[in-house]
Image (spheres, rainbow, N blue to C red):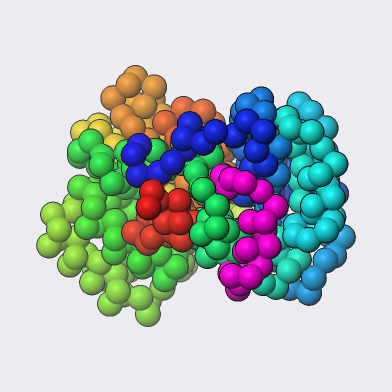
């Protein structure tokens, strides 16, 4: 990777390094309920600390709009962060000014300090230049390890990079390398698997993907909209009828770009949206008026299996059915299993991310078997849309 500086390009010994992390982690009963993001960030922090830097961690948490509040305090993640890095992390009551400086002055090189939620200041989300400068004053170097917040042009993700030598942290580096291999410089053929409920939220994503990939497999509620746009009766299934024109436009773009659209051949349908509901498999055009397609069926799994056999790269976003309720997780599980198996055999590079995807793939038990599963939600989606992410753009070598 030559486009970005990494930690390898920085001399951090004896320096104060500001690390933008994404500690926006899920909490339950006051405790971190999923430490994935923290676990993936930890190697960057420990590497910098071992190399003799004072490591100052900056992050947002939640979406506070009215200044500090206890619920959104990053103090709530301090114990989980200390556990992940294997040392006691110090805490600064503010992310700028005297309180931040005092916390940083209070520790030795090799220590890690977490500063309070950057979003406790309204200037953060405005990317206020004076505020970015106040953050930059706290350190000598800037490392951004928050790919999952890189779609935000905020003071701590974008503005501060204008004031200090900047580099990608190890997690950011891993994300960028995986995403580049998956879509910018992929081994072909490339297949995208896109599921999820609605096409209205993924129009840009689909429009970009059909121009870049060789095959696009669609599942979830959005596939119903495509079938409806082709004149198929989807019964009581989730379907955005007012999006039929957009679906047809995407089909046209796909055709012009030589991208093969793979729509479901069959469905598992039910009359109720609940676990264990009575269900049956029907061809895609055989959905009854009072039935809902809740998953792709076995013929689709077989069809996708054959198609994906030929792929060298797979990019995955979104579940193929209502994976939260059984047995409507079967299609997602089966296709994810096929991708995982081929990845393990060495024939496939598989990258997934965005929103529900991580939980769907974790549910399918393939989390460890894909080549890379992104820790990002919205940022992964914007990257699939082909957008320049401000936090990434700010790290480009000047
Ligand atoms: C996320 O959790 O997706 C990131 O931390 C970004 O959070 P935001 O959507 O509140 O900017
Ligand atoms: Mg988000």
| Residue in the image at 51% along x and 48% along y | 165
Query: Which residue is more in the foreground, 378 or 311?
Result: 378
Tell whether 384 sits left or right of 188.
Answer: right
Q: Position of residue 337 (x, y in %)?
A: 43, 31
Query: Which residue is more in the foreground, 355 or 374?
Result: 374
The quarter of the picture where the N terminus appears is top left
**In the rendered image, the vertical position of residue 29 relative to residue 312, given as above or below:** below
Q: Position of residue 366 (x, y in %)?
A: 50, 31
Q: Is residue 340 magenta?
A: no
| Residue in the image at 54% along x and 33% along y | 11
Tell whether 3 sits left or right of 94.
Answer: left
Query: Which residue is more in the foreground, 276 or 148?
Result: 148
| Residue in the image at 20% along x and 38% along y | 188
Instruction: Note whether residue 185 is visible.
Output: yes
Query: Which residue is more in the foreground, 254 or 222?
Result: 254
Q: Position of residue 302 (x, y in %)?
A: 30, 37
Q: Residue furthest top?
A: 345
Q: Position of residue 78 (x, y in %)?
A: 81, 42
Q: Is residue 140 magenta?
A: yes
The segment highlighted magenta reads 125-143
| Residue in the image at 79% along x and 54% along y | 100
**In the rendered image, the vertical position of residue 193 relative to residue 161, given as above or below:** above
């Amino acid at each position: 990777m030559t486009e970005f500086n990494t930690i390898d390009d920085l001399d951090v010994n004896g320096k104060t390094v500001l690390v933008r992390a994404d500690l926006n982690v899920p909490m339950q009963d006051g405790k971190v309920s999923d430490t994935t993001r923290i676990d993936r960030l930890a190697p960057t922090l420990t590497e910098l600390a071992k190399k003799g830097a004072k490591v100052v961690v900056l992050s947002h948490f939640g979406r506070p709009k009215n200044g500090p509040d206890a619920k959104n305090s990053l103090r709530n993640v301090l114990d989980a962060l200390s556990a992940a890095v294997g040392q006691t992390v110090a805490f600064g009551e503010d992310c700028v000014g005297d309180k931040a400086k005092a916390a940083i002055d209070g520790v030795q090189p090799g220590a890690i300090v977490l500063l309070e939620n950057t979003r406790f200041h309204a200037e953060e989300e405005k990317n206020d230049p004076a505020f970015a400068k106040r953050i930059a004053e706290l350190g000598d170097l800037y490392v951004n390890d928050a790919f999952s917040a890189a779609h935000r042009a905020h003071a701590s993700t974008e503005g501060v990079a204008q004031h200090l030598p900047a580099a990608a942290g190890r997690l950011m580096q891993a994300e960028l390398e995986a995403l580049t291999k998956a879509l910018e410089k992929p081994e072909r053929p490339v297949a995208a698997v896109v599921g999820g409920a609605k096409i209205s939220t993924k129009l840009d994503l689909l429009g970009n993907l059909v121009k870049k990939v060789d095959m696009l497999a669609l599942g979830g509620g959005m596939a119903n909209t495509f079938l409806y746009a082709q004149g198929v009766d989807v019964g009581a299934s989730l379907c955005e009828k007012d999006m039929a024109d957009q679906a047809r436009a995407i089909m046209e773009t796909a055709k012009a770009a030589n991208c093969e659209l793979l729509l479901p051949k069959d469905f598992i349908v039910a009359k109720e949206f609940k676990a264990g509901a009575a269900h049956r498999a029907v061809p895609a055009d055989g959905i009854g008026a009072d039935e809902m397609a809740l998953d792709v069926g076995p013929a689709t799994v077989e069809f996708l299996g054959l198609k994906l056999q030929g792929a060298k790269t797979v990019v995955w976003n979104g579940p193929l059915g209502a994976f939260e309720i059984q047995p409507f997780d079967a299609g997602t599980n089966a296709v994810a299993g096929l991708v995982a198996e081929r990845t393990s055999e060495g024939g496939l590079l598989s990258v997934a991310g965005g929103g529900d995807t991580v939980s769907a793939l974790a549910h399918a038990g393939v989390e460890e078997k894909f080549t890379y599963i992104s820790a990002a939600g919205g940022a992964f989606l914007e990257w699939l849309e082909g957008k320049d992410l401000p936090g990434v753009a700010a790290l480009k070598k000047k």
